[in-house]
Image (cartoon, grey):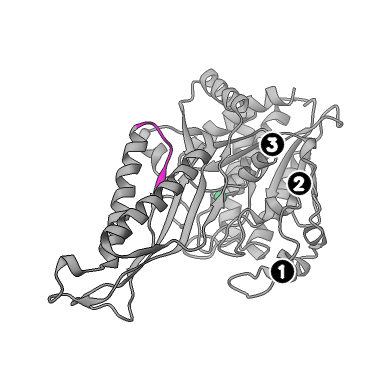
Amino acid sequence: MTPALRTGLAIAERLFTDLATTTSDPPGVTRASFGEGEQQAHRLIAKAAREIGMEVEWDAIGTLRAVLPGRDRSLPAVVIGSHLDSVPHGGNFDGAAGVIMGIAATAALAAQGYAPQRDLLVLGIRAEEMCWFPAHYLGSRALFGQLPAEAPDALRRADTGQSLAEHMNALGLDPSSIRERRALLDPARIACFIEPHIEQGPVLVETGMPIAIVTGIRGSLRYPRASVAGEHAHAGAVPRSHRRDAALAGVALLAALDERWAALEGNGADLVCTAGILSTDPVHHTPTKVPGLLRFSLDIRSEDAALLAELDRWLHAEAARIGANRGVSFDFGPPTHAAPALMDADLRLRLHAAARHLGIPAMEMASGAGHDCATFAGLGIPSAMLFLRNRNGSHNPDEAMEIEDFAAGLAVLTTTLEELLA
Ligand SMILES: [Zn+2]
């Protein structure tokens, strides 16, 4: 490791420690969106950024913007960023690791006397965790004027019941750009966006790799409130031929979906399927009754939008077939869709080349969880994500990223930045 990288890493280590201490809420940390913990994180990062010579400001909606100025300020900036909020009693690294890596990489570049041609902008994005306000990518979509105009007054924080506007006003921020659907950052002024983030699944731990370069952020097709309607009947008296068993029909659909998933995955498709809710009607169910109602949810994710659409058609056809065979009817209820976001091929190649050059093993993987990076990619900004190995998943106090793995990511990012900023 070079002395410059060691300088960056030391700043990162101090920030992780200070962040864990100041936002501590045992077990874990709490950094509520537009709340005290998030504010503390912003203050700490801003102080560290100023100390390494970055220009620091907050925009009207509270996004932290730290800039290492380039020689030609008319050029579009290279942007690194992630979010600084956490779930209640969460881990120290989800979100914060990405912002801290941006600061640490800047410190490393500054320490080696590197003068960038274009601006390097590090963003501390607000309100990414949906547990506080019920909106995807709230902070990054607000940044680009993409939230619905009524969002500041309609969205209420789960713990306080207060509106987004009330929380923003309390911090001296201004929700008017959200109401006017006005962008505070011009996508044309962004050359590219990179979001480093801890991995939230077990893949890097199991493969023994320190980092991954993300291929895309999965989109989703969700049916949160699906149901099967059949007929309640006596569990002993009614023969198979006369049953309209909602539970067995629902299970038949899920088994068929599972089989199809396995086949598609066998052919190399990117796909994950979950029925997180599956229950008979608690008002009517007993062990001695054929269930007449089953409620279930479906959450299907893939990097491939065409595959999601195809699977949606297949689900409805399969449900109709099972329904006809078993005398039940499926009602999927209203779906929600989130479009997949593919990561930029050139940025991925550059990150891989940097890792190879440094002798750091790196694999490719899709991101199953959503990230602010999807907002940037959705605007046509070349975007990439760098995943860091992390034990025990995320959104819990047991998140465990080793600083050596952060250092590997930092080296890859810094090397890549040297090229992108030139
Ligand atoms: Zn996150």
Q: Is residue 404 above or below residue 254?
A: above
What mark, if any, has residue 380 been given in the picture?
A: 3
Residue pointed to by mark 2: 65
Observer-side mark, 2 or 1, equals 1
Q: Position of residue 20 (x, y in %)?
A: 56, 55
Residue pointed to by mark 1: 167
Q: Position of residue 94 (x, y in %)?
A: 54, 50
Count of marks overlaid on the render: 3
Q: Is residue 375 visible?
A: yes
Q: Secondary structure at mark 2?
A: strand
- CA gap between label 2 and label 3 equals 21 Å
Question: Which of 267 and 232 lies nearest the eye of the viewer?
Answer: 232
- CA gap between label 2 and label 1 equals 20 Å
Res 187 → quadrant: top right
- Give the residue type at disc 3: Gly
Q: Is residue 340 left or right of residue 329?
A: right
Observer-side mark, 2 or 3, equals 3
Q: Is residue 103 visible?
A: no
Q: Earlier in the sequence, mark 1 or mark 3?
A: 1
Q: Secondary structure at mark 3?
A: loop
Locate the N terminus by quadrant. top right
**What secondary structure is the stretch in magenta mostly built from?**
loop
- Give the residue type at disc 1: His
Q: Pointer 2 and pointer 1: residues touching (CB < 8 Å)?
A: no
Q: Earlier in the sequence, mark 2 or mark 1?
A: 2
- Mark 2 Cα-neighbour bin, 10 Å: few <14, some 14–19, many ≥20: many
| Magenta-drawn segment | 267-272
